[in-house]
Every structure is written in structure tokens, then in C-alpha cells.
């Protein structure tokens, strides 16, 4: 089966660094197709050029987050959902460009997480939905599905463990067939905080019984919810003041 990765991405100082790191991981993974969706009203030159230089099989899409849902620099990171319309654009692309009989697995891979190569082989043979732990998330060392006798029965998470699927976006992959079977299943900016994953999987008529625990019955951490420190550039202004000129805007970072 082909692994389809759906990656929302947005412009910020660290974007090219994140995409470079992720693409280098993906270069080690056989049989994948990277769907990268920019949060913007057009394809940016930076992402376009970046993708054209990778040797990965990719599809480049874009859709802007409406201004009322867009995070501002000052917003705490939990205030607004991120990547919602971008992931939906990825799902719609799959519905329009793959056939329901085609063997595929879909994974929502944010651009800033850290992925072990092993996680891709764990997810590749997903029948419906496979699940595994995610490290460095939820203000815990990890969150994970709790498995009893080979079945997921509950969630190890501090925050709202009673959510139907109390896991991070990085903690599951779905069979492509489900994406075709439930054309109405999508993420939404209107969903209660922390319920994106649950809403999507519930719309696909899934229950705990359908979940396939991977990563040694969910005892191994193979993906980490890393977050990159915001780079500050306050000395740029000082350079201008002191020397009359700052960094060259033609040099892409
Ligand atoms: C956590 C979860 O891990 C995400 O899967 C979830 O989307 C997010 O919370 C949420 O609450 O919506 P976090 O690390 O806080 O993630 O979020 P980011 O990594 O900043 O964003 C998730 C993805 O959306 C990234 O691929 C990012 O590039 C993209 N994004 C972010 C946009 O497309 N637009 C934005 O304005 C911000
Ligand atoms: Mn993130």
C-alpha cells in the first residue's frame, strides 16, 4: 500500500527548516506520496521551489484559513485549531485522484513533528485505523492508547480522557477506503477544542473495537510532537541602526 501523508504548512521564519527536516525523513520511506497543503491564498515561491528540488513524489495544494480562524502571533497556541481546511483539501484530493479500490493508508503528518522511520512501516498495513503512542504531547512524557488483550480500551491522557478518540493527530492512520466510503468526513473549525480527531473518526462510524494497536501494543514511542522554538530576529533592526543595512531579503531562509 502507498502511504499518503497529508501535511498542512504555513509561512513563518522556520518553515523551510521544518520542511527540509521532514523531507529528509521522508526520503528514507519507500512508497509514499506527500500531499502538502499551504495555508495561503496561493502557492508560495518558497514551497514551490523547495518541492521541485526534492526527489519525493508530491502534490502541492493551497487553501487559506479564513481570517477569523487564523492564529495571530500573540494567541496562545491552543486558542484556534490549525491546519483544518488544509487537511480537508488533502482528503478531497485523495477522493478525486485515487480510486476506492486502490491500496492506500492516510496519515496526517504535521510539518514540525519528529517521525521515526519505523512508524511508517507500522502504519502501512492498516485495515481500518491503526493507533500508537505520541511522545512529548499533552504535557506528559507521552500519550497512548491503553491496550488490554490486544484491544484498545481507553486512553492514557490527562486532558479529557473521555473523548471518543483521545489522541493527537500524529497518533493514528486510516485506510484510504474509509476516506472514499465517508465523503462527508472532514475536519471543522467549529469543532470543540481537542475534538478534531474524535469528530473525524466518529463520522467514519468507527469505535474502539476497530482500532489496531501498533508499536508493540502501543508501548513504543515512534513519533514525537516536537515544537520548534520561535526564532527571534530583533538584531536585524539593530544592524540597520548601527550599520545602515540589515540582512539581504534576496537570501531565502
Ligand atoms: C496540535 C496538534 O498536534 C495538531 O495536529 C493540531 O492541528 C493542533 O494542535 C490544533 O490544535 O489544531 P500544534 O503543534 O500545537 O499541534 O500545532 P502546529 O504544529 O502549530 O500546527 C499543526 C499543523 O498545521 C502544522 O503542520 C502547521 O504547519 C499547520 N498550520 C499551523 C497551518 O497550516 N496554519 C497555521 O496558521 C498554523
Ligand atoms: Mn506542531
Image (cartoon, rainbow, N blue to C red):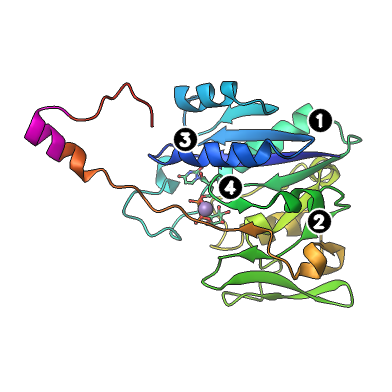
Q: SS at mark 3?
A: helix
Label 2 vs 4, first from the N-terminus: 4
The residue labelled by disc 1 is: 98
Answer yes or no: disc 4 within 8 Å of ligand 1.
yes
Instruction: Identify whether 12 is placed above or below 204.
Output: above
Q: Nearer the viewer, residue 103 or 15?
A: 15
Task: Name the residue that disc number 4 marks.
Answer: 110
Q: Quadrant of the C terminus?
A: top left
Report the number of numbered marks: 4
Q: Nearer the viewer, residue 139 or 163?
A: 139
Circle 1 residues within 10 Å: few <14, some 14–19, many ≥20: some
Disc on res. 16: 3
Task: Say whether residue 197 is left or right of residue 99.
Answer: left
Q: Earlier in the sequence, mark 2 or mark 3?
A: 3
Mark-to-mark CA distance, 3 and 1? 29 Å
* Image spot of residue 231 (x, y percent): 34, 47
The residue labelled by disc 2 is 129
Asked if the residues shown at circle 2 and circle 1 are in contact, with their CB atoms under 8 angstroms apart, the answer is no
Q: Are marks 4 and 3 in contact (CB under 8 Å)?
A: no
Quarter assignment of residue 179? top right
Closer to us: mark 2 or mark 3?
Answer: 3
Q: Which residues are magenta?
A: 238-245
Amino acid at each position: 500500500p502507498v502511504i499518503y501523508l497529508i501535511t498542512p504548512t504555513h509561512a513563518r521564519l522556520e518553515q523551510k527548516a521544518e520542511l527540509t527536516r521532514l523531507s529528509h525523513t521522508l526520503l528514507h520511506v519507500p512508497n509514499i506520496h506527500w500531499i502538502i497543503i499551504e495555508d495561503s491564498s496561493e502557492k508560495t515561491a518558497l514551497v514551490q521551489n523547495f518541492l521541485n528540488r526534492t526527489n519525493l513524489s508530491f502534490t502541492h495544494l493551497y487553501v487559506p484559513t479564513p481570517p477569523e480562524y487564523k492564529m495571530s502571533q500573540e494567541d496562545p497556541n491552543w486558542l484556534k485549531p490549525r491546519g483544518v481546511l488544509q487537511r480537508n483539501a488533502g482528503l478531497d484530493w485523495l477522493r478525486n485522484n485515487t480510486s476506492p479500490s486502490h491500496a492506500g493508508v492516510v496519515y496526517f503528518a504535521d510539518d514540525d513533528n519528529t517521525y521515526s522511520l519505523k512508524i511508517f512501516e507500522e502504519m502501512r498495513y492498516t485495515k481500518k485505523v491503526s493507533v500508537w503512542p505520541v511522545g512529548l504531547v499533552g504535557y506528559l512524557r507521552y500519550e497512548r492508547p491503553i491496550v488490554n488483550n490486544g484491544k484498545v480500551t481507553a486512553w492514557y491522557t490527562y486532558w479529557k480522557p473521555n473523548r471518543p478518540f483521545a489522541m493527537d493527530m500524529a497518533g493514528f492512520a486510516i485506510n484510504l477506503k474509509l476516506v472514499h466510503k465517508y465523503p462527508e468526513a472532514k475536519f471543522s473549525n467549529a469543532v470543540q477544542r481537542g475534538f478534531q480527531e474524535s469528530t473525524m473518526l466518529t463520522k467514519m462510524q468507527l469505535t474502539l473495537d476497530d482500532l489496531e494497536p501498533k508499536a508493540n501494543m502501543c508501548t513504543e514511542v515512534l513519533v514525537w510532537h516536537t515544537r520548534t522554538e520561535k526564532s527571534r530576529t530583533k538584531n536585524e533592526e539593530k544592524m540597520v541602526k548601527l550599520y545602515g543595512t540589515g540582512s539581504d531579503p534576496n537570501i531565502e531562509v
